[in-house]
Amino acid sequence: MTFPHRLLALFLLTGATALVSAKDFLPAIVYDFGGKFDRSFNQSASEGAEKFKRDTGIAFREFEITNAAQREQIMAQSAKRGANIIVAVGFTQASAVEKVAKQFPNVKFTIIDAVVDLPNVQSINFREQESSFLCGMAAALASKTGKIGFVGGMDIPLIRKFALGYVEGAHYVNPGIEVFQNMTGTTPAAWGDPTKGAELAKSQFGRGADVVFHAAGATGIGVMQAAEDAGQLSIGCDSNQDYLHPGSVLTSAVKRVDVAVYKAFEDAKNGTWKPGQLVLGLAENGVDYSFDEHNRTVLTPAMKSRLDQARADIVSGKLKVSEYKP
């Protein structure tokens, strides 16, 4: 796994905290709903933690939740049992992080996809709309029907941000393209329902869409299976999911949660961890679109050239992608 130098540099901040010896260092991670093997958001976080373990030999504690009440309990127990840093994966953990971080001011907390303004909390967010813009471009370039789709997970501003970038990117290529949009639900259960994801994708294919992008966690696995079954294309999310259905996955909107987790652990161990907000986009290599041996037959050189030019224009500021405003 490659960890981009620019993104690493963002985290390499000087700090006054002393270096923690390996034998005294205990990191912990709490996954969001969907579990560590969702092949998407949580799995990317897990891969970052596992890489840290391989590189340092330091074990970490990890926890998968089945109900919301467990978040606070797990974080408090981890802090009591000596965790130096606790990484909370997902915006739904913000209230738990805020409460427990106040109770344990000497423990470091890093939260992904939310902002908690406390002196011992680091908040890492991403410009998902930028990678989604590129995916929307790819969908429009690949579509033969002039109709594409989007299936979101839980209907929240974060997923609306994915959708906004996707629609803008598609319209950047083809102003007349039609984009179908469906959200899976309004509760956390929306992240873990592949059957519902497949149903929504099938409905969109039935209306003429030939490319469907999911931003739905484990629910998206159903979207991607439905695309392959229908002989159409899907677009993966968070992790590089091209390998799940080679030749059927056009690309993936990659979000480097793995890097964020790895560096949170590493910086806490090295004494360079700092609280505050970090926002990572294309310029920081925090998000991107995927291209590898699994999708090179469907994402053509001409398409890739268009995407790479747009990517460069976004990084330079020449091309602006809208921020979602609720």
Image (spheres, rainbow, N blue to C red):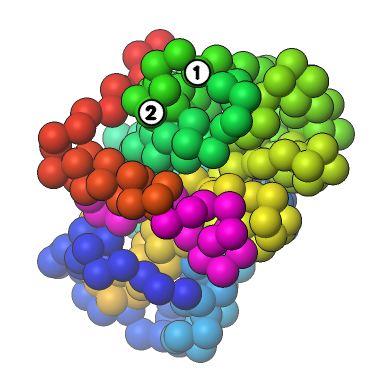
Give SS at disc 1. loop
Residues at badges 2 and 1 in contact (C-beta under 8 Å)?
Answer: yes
Q: Position of residue 73 (x, y in %)?
A: 64, 45
Say left or right for 106 vs 232.
Answer: left
Q: Which residue is mark 1?
A: 177
Say left or right for 305 vs 36.
Answer: left
Q: Nearer the viewer, residue 7 or 318?
A: 318
Q: Is residue 104 visible?
A: no
Which residues make up the magenta segment?
282-301
Q: Is 177 rendered above or below residue 87?
A: above
Residue 173's disc is: 2
Say left or right for 323 vs 167.
Answer: left
Q: Amino acid at mark 2?
A: Val
| Residue found at x 35% / y 46% | 307
Quadrant of the snapshot with the C terminus = top left
| Residue found at x 47% / y 36% | 141
113 is within the stretch colored magenta: no
Give SS at disc 2. helix
Q: Is residue 309 visible?
A: yes
Say left or right for 71 vs 13.
Answer: right
| Residue found at x 42% / y 67% | 262
Q: Position of residue 168 (x, y in %)?
A: 38, 23
Q: Position of residue 178 (x, y in %)?
A: 55, 15
Q: Amino acid at mark 1?
A: Ile
